[in-house]
């Protein structure tokens, strides 16, 4: 069985200490009233790359041996940005492979960090194939966005901070895609606070980890457009670590709709004054939709990133329709 130890996560914390921020845990008065118990937001969107993925990427890049020729990865955007940022700090070449589903704002962010960007195909799997080709032909090292022990331990450092900031944390809602975040955070939280419940939340279209846990083994799902674009992509049919971690450590996985994500984006903006991505409000969406079985004590969710297209954000805040590929989400003006 796969496992990530507390030692690995504590070691990651020392490794990334001067690259990634320790982020605040912000109380949300509005969501606290709605939940009837303390509701806290872990502000990972204020990391230097605008997302938590810097933690795992930095831990992986800083652990590479001397003489490494360069790094590559496939990414829905934020992992690539983290790898590009960490590689630049180490003076390494970085080649980031992405599918055409990745929003332009994320591509621009990665180029601005000096990395090479390759847009290949229409899915994460296509991008992954190109990344592996580069490993073979150009001698660069691949850093998986979620299925790598250093990446998972890096993401797990969020869990250590959370329990220090809120020792009696009862429930943690974690945005879930490939499961590097949820697996690492659950490993940390369960090691230091076994009674804290850790619940993964994904969008209901193309939730690969949810489908894989239900099937008992990694399965493929069709990748579709979503407001939570950072949660797209599969978990890899040859998944080594994150699937077992999520299957054994998560207490539950909850799914939310695009309409629920749309509304949650409005809520965190109008009530908490935060600009963030669809992927990071799935926990708030689950609460608002009444999809969480309440257990007494503080609830927290990880606000994972803010790298979204600002034109889309403006449309949502104005209650306008949003078109993403073949998906249209009907607009609705915000009301508390
Ligand atoms: C990558 C990402 C996630 C999900 O992390 P996984 O390790 O793939 O489960 C959630 N939110 C944002 C903003 C991300 O970039």
Image (spheres, rainbow, N blue to C red):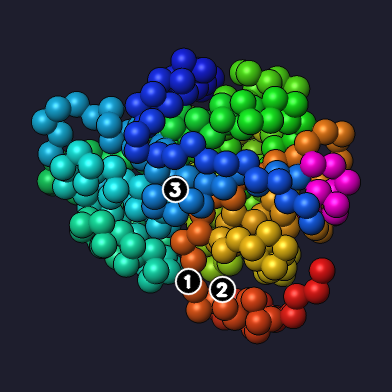
Q: In this view, does 68 lie above or below 318?
A: above
Task: Tell me if residue 13 can be seen.
Answer: yes
From the viewer's perspective, is 20 left or right of 40?
Answer: left
Residue 233, given in percent of the width and then of the height, sits at 49, 54
Q: How far is disc 1 from disc 3 in space, using C-alphas?
A: 18 Å
What residue sits right under mark 2 in the picture?
A: 313
Q: In whole angstroms, how far apart are the C-alphas of marks 3 and 2?
A: 20 Å
Q: Do the residues labelled 1 and 3 touch (CB within 8 Å)?
A: no
| Residue topped by disc 1 | 309
Q: Position of residue 219 (x, y in %)?
A: 55, 45
Q: What stretch is highlighted in magenta?
A: 31-38
Sequence-first tag of 3 and 2: 3
The residue positioned 34% from the left and 38% from the top of the image is: 19
Left or right of 191? Residue 4 is left
Question: Where is residue 267 shown, x and y percent of the image?
Answer: 72, 64
Occupied quadrant, residue 108: bottom left
Dividing the picture into quarters, in which one does residue 146 lie? top left
- Callout 1: few (<14), some (14-19), or many (20+) C-alpha neighbours within 10 Å? some
Residues 249 and 110: in front is 110
């Amino acid at each position: 069985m796969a496992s990530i130890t507390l030692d690995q996560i504590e070691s990651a914390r020392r490794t990334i200490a001067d690259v990634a921020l320790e982020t605040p845990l912000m109380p949300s008065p509005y969501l606290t009233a709605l939940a009837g118990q303390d509701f806290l937001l872990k502000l990972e969107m204020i990391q230097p790359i605008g997302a938590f993925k810097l933690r795992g990427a930095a831990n992986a890049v800083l652990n590479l041996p001397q003489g490494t020729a360069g790094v590559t990865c496939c990414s829905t955007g934020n992992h690539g940005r983290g790898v590009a940022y960490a590689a630049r700090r180490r003076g390494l070449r970085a080649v980031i492979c992405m599918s055409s589903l990745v929003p332009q704002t994320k591509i621009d962010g990665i180029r601005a960090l000096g990395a090479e960007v390759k847009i290949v195909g229409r899915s994460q799997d296509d991008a992954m194939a190109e990344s592996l080709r580069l490993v073979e032909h150009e001698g660069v090292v691949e850093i998986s966005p979620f299925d790598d022990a250093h990446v998972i331990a890096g993401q797990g450092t969020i869990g250590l901070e959370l329990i220090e900031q809120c020792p009696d944390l009862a429930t943690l809602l974690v945005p879930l895609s490939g499961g590097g975040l949820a697996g690492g955070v659950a490993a940390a939280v369960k090691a230091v606070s076994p009674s804290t419940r850790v619940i993964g939340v994904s969008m209901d279209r193309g939730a690969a980890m949810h489908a894989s846990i239900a099937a008992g083994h990694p399965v493929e799902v069709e990748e579709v457009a979503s407001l939570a674009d950072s949660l797209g992509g599969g978990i890899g049919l040859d998944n080594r670590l994150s699937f077992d971690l999520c299957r054994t450590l998560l207490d539950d996985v909850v799914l939310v709709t695009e309409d629920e994500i749309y509304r949650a984006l409005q809520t965190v903006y109008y009530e908490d004054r935060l600009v963030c991505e669809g992927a990071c409000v799935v926990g708030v969406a689950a609460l608002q939709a009444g999809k969480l079985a309440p257990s007494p004590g503080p609830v927290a969710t990880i606000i994972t990133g803010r790298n979204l297209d600002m034109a889309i954000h403006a449309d949502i805040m104005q209650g306008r329709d949003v078109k993403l590929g073949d998906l249209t989400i009907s607009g609705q003006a915000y009301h508390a």
